[in-house]
């Protein structure tokens, strides 16, 4: 194979695939539609000079623990990657002044629990966590082919036995609410840990979502969190330098308008109207965009699967430059990287249902990121950069659950809805509005306009519900990133193992080439 491997999309999966391939001596060319590489992993000055905002992804724990970093971490450091360890990863703000917080200090974590029984349960779960997390992590790190999956199951069966394997399989199919109510007696903990499910489109009552509260809550205790020094872009910048150091290239403002194929084999790309011959293409695209570029693949079930791929609800991002720390009603919250805002598991479930019905939620679920608490380089001295992610929202507005906002398009709705979010934050942190020096509000439709892979503002590039996960992500028979077209491969968050900064699909695919 003499020609370069062409990668469409400079998101984290595309860059990881290209960097790994380039480091192994392969010729790579990355084409990025936008003006800068990175996809959802970028850092920009979105408010005022000196304030550095992660445009979407902030938590880099999955990347730090990825297979790519295990192989290339030392080289990435030489190319400028700097990570910051966080010992207080997250907290849940509930009734103003009340919170549950998870720290790497178990005594500090338990101090926010009210139930002695729950404290004993937490410590028991922590003793079991390494073994269970290794199994689940191993599954997430297994390419989703029939052979690889059967080998993985067989190894775990021999190692753990039927009983433990059955318990883990049950966890994989359980909803967050069922697992949490079976495990803890305090409703505060049900609220605090269920919020993690929404990070991957698992409302409290959606089957298959329990593993995310399990992994994130207990993993936060065990390992903390990792963010990027100066912003998440430290990852993107180092990946681009690594690709270029090995002779590859990343070209931005490059709009790939078609992927040509003949007799079931890829033959080329159309980039900004120019036809380029290509033998191997890795497409980091949302399924609907891939479908548009290839047309009829010659495989009816594959084409229908791309068209039926379901996206998660949208997200709003609010980037704030603050004149000082957040004045939390519970001052301890100022010490955590993430603060989830939401008062009960039932309120979280209601918010999800409202969004799914097309309604602007009356009490949105907030993920408040405070990266400058751990990385002062992100804001001028004495100031704070605040990252507010609003989960979950309709892409198309049918109404307002509170009956206050009449707008039915995001251009008109985003300002009053952002004001609702700030009101909710103000309840938890009286006086925070007065500390806002500048803000930038990015609606779900704004997110999609900036990055078409975020369809409807879906930052996950597709729901992770069981019907669309594991062997079914994105289409049954193609979860390993293959397509019916020889030489054309899928990568990105729409492909197993899905969303997040672990870049699993990009790294898996690079190993196949």
Image: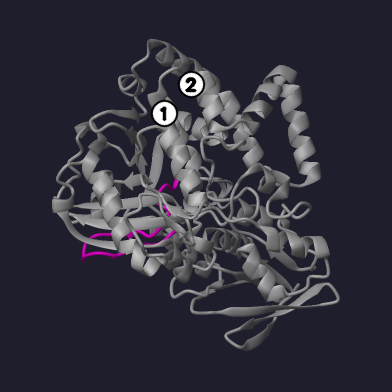
> Are the two marked residues, 2 and 1, in contact with CB atoms closer than 8 angstroms?
yes
Residue 240 is at least partly visible in this image: yes
Vertical side of 68 occupied by 242: above or below? below
Under circle 2, the secondary element is: helix
Q: Which residues are magenta?
A: 41-61
The residue at 66%/27% (across/down) is 170
Under circle 1, the secondary element is: helix
Q: Is residue 48 in the magenta section?
A: yes
| Image location of residue 141, percent across then percent down | 63, 42
Q: Is residue 416 in the magenta section?
A: no
Quarter of the image for the N terminus: give it.
bottom right
Please state which of residues 75 and 40 is positioned toward the viewer in this rendering: 40
Residue sticking out furthest to the front = 403
Question: Residue tagged by mark 2?
Answer: 126
**For residue 221, which numbered disc appears in the image?**
1
- How many residues crowd mark 1 within 10 Å: few (<14), some (14–19), many (20+)? many
Residue sticking out furthest to the right = 263
Q: Is residue 39 left or right of residue 431?
A: right
Nearest to N terminus: mark 2 or mark 1: 2
Using the rendered view, name the quadrant where residue 52 is placed: bottom left
| Image location of residue 198, percent across then percent down | 48, 43
């Amino acid at each position: 194979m003499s020609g370069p491997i062409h990668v469409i999309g400079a998101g984290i999966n595309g860059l990881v695939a290209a960097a790994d391939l380039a480091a192994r001596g392969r010729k790579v060319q990355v084409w990025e539609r936008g003006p800068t590489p990175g996809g959802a992993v970028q850092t920009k000055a979105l408010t005022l000079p000196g304030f550095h905002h992660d445009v979407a992804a902030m938590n880099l724990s999955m990347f730090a623990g990825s297979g790519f970093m295990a192989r290339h971490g030392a080289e990435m450091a030489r190319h400028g990657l700097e990570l910051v360890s966080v010992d207080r990863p997250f907290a849940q703000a509930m009734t103003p002044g009340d919170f549950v917080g998870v720290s790497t200090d178990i005594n500090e974590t338990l101090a926010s629990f009210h139930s002695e029984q729950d404290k004993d349960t937490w410590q028991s779960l922590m003793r079991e966590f390494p073994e269970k997390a290794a199994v689940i992590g191993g599954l997430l790190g297994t390419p989703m082919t029939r052979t690889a999956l059967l080998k993985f199951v067989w190894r775990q069966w021999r190692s753990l036995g039927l009983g433990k394997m059955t318990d883990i399989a049950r966890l994989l199919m359980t909803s967050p609410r069922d697992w949490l109510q079976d495990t803890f007696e305090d409703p505060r903990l049900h609220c605090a840990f269920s919020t993690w499910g929404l990070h991957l489109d698992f409302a409290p009552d959606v089957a298959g979502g329990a593993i995310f509260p399990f992994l994130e809550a207990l993993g936060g205790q065990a390992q903390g969190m990792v963010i990027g020094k100066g912003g998440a872009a430290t990852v993107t910048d180092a990946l681009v330098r690594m690709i270029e150091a090995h002779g590859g290239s990343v070209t931005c403002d490059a709009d790939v308008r078609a992927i040509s194929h003949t007799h079931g084999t890829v033959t080329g790309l159309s980039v900004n109207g120019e036809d380029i011959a290509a033998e191997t293409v890795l497409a980091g695209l949302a399924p609907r965009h891939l479908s548009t570029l290839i047309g009829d693949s010659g495989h009816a079930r594959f084409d229908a699967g791309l068209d039926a791929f379901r996206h998660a609800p949208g997200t709003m991002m609010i980037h704030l430059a603050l004149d000082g720390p957040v004045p939390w009603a519970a001052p301890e919250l100022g010490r955590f990287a993430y603060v989830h805002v939401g008062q009960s598991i039932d309120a979280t479930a209601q918010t999800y249902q409202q969004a799914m019905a097309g309604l602007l939620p009356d009490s949105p679920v907030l993920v408040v990121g405070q990266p400058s608490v751990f990385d002062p380089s992100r804001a001028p001295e004495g100031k704070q950069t605040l990252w507010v992610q609003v989960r979950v929202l309709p892409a198309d507005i049918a109404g307002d659950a509170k009956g206050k906002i009449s707008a039915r398009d995001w251009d008109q709705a985003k300002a009053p809805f952002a004001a609702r979010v700030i009101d909710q934050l103000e309840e938890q942190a009286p006086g925070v509005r007065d500390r806002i020096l500048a803000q930038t509000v990015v609606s779900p439709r704004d997110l999609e306009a900036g990055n078409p892979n975020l369809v409807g503002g879906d930052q996950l590039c597709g729901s992770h519900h069981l019907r669309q996960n594991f062997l079914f992500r994105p289409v049954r028979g193609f979860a390993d990133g293959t397509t019916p077209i020889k030489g054309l491969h899928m990568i990105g968050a729409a492909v197993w193992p899905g969303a997040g900064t672990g870049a699993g699909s990009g790294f898996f695919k690079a190993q196949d080439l």
